[in-house]
Image (cartoon, helix red, strand yellow):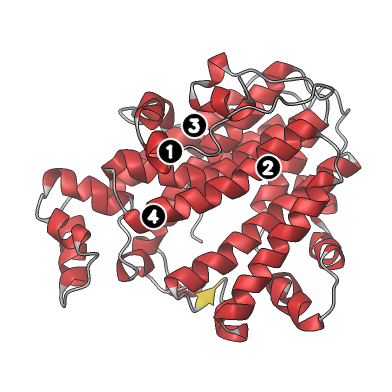
Amino acid sequence: TGIKTGIRSGLNEAKFPTSSALLPEQDNGVDKPINDIEGAGLRDELKEWGIGRTPKGTLGEGYNVNPFENVKGEIANLDDEMLRLIDTKPSALKEAAGYFWGLRSGGKKIRPAVLFLISKSLPSTSSTVLPTQRRLACITEMIHTASLFHDDVIDKGEIRRGNKTANVMFGNKMAILGGDFLLAKASVSLARLRNLEVTELMSGVIEHLVRGEVMQIKGEGGIEGYLGKNFFKTSSLIANSAMSTAILGGAPPAYVKEAYLYGKYLGNAFQLVDDVLDYEGQVEVLGKERYGDLKSGLATGPVLFAEETRPEMKALRVRKFREEGDIRRALDIIEGTDAIERTKDLARVNAEMARDVVEGWGGERDALRELCRIVVDRKK
């Protein structure tokens, strides 16, 4: 049935072909219209995204481990490695594409950290990171960085990670070309892994990023559409790269499935927290301005949850908060509801689900579980 079809119809029914099997030339949903994915498929998965669940309240216990310290050696020099991968002429293209890595402003590298921790937790790889798994981490970061370049052009972003965005530094054209170049380089590196399953999964992620951006622009579907957009724009990359890491490590099918679920739930939690920080975060800590989503006309969790009890929010959302006083009015409505707390609760539920998925793992299990708490408690 194909990997992506299996995922959309429920992971319990998903079929994972062996790495030696050629993937059949059939419709795996790649060419289906977005509406097909925004419809029943997402509704069937809402229960798996934490809707209607209450947090257990156990993430604060901690596991006395620093996930990033445990993969410090693997993350070291990752920026330099990616800069070497995109070495090209003209130099202006490399300068734009490698802008954030050159600044060493790539943050804690949470996506590579997830992949390295999973690599060191698989029963088949003896607590080591294979060269193919390391290269996959680079590919994942290249895809992620490309999406940031494109997002900042679309959203007219000016500050990211405390620095000027690529579009401000180099202009929209070079920022777009830099992002395109990163996707091209990621695709070449992906092909060199010579694994058809991983190639299909990670190629699908690039498709998902575009679909998610279109869903965000449309802003339709309420909570259902919002969670679907979150999956396509954020969770899919983490989930499918986690799954690919397990595949490259020769992990048993159960680990492959659990790696995907861990990445999916962690990605969901990460994006939900990100949306809360847009309202509650401190500018000097966030490295970007507050209320950026509202200013860009985007309705995230706090807006949508507030609308459930304050229907006057709908008119503001539909006109994308463009009229004078709309943003202040939206903030007042949100502050008068439990919308922020409901968004936080949904993030906690997803983080707890991610934590529980790896309960039976060995290796860096506690680091993976601690990462769930870190994602929920982060301030930037």
Q: Residues within 10 Å of mark 1 (few under 14, many from 20)?
A: many
Could you say where residue 333 lies in the image, as x and y percent from the top left? 15, 58
Q: Nearer the viewer, mark 3 or mark 2?
A: 2
Q: Are marks 3 and 1 in contact (CB under 8 Å)?
A: yes
Picture coordinates of residue 80, whole percent (x, y): 84, 66
Q: Distance of mark 2 from mark 1, alpha carbons?
A: 27 Å
Q: Check disc 2 and report the residue beneath it.
A: 202
The residue wearing badge 4 is: 216
Residue 168 image-quadrant placement? bottom right
Residue 294 image point, x, y percent: 30, 66
Dot 4 crowding, Cα within 10 Å, few <14, some 14–19, many 20+: many
Between marks 1 and 4 in the image, the one whose residue lies nearer the viewer: 4
**On the picture, is 57 further left or further right than 185?**
left
The residue pinned by badge 1 equals 348
Element carrying mark 4: helix
Indicate left or right for 349 with 138 as reference: left
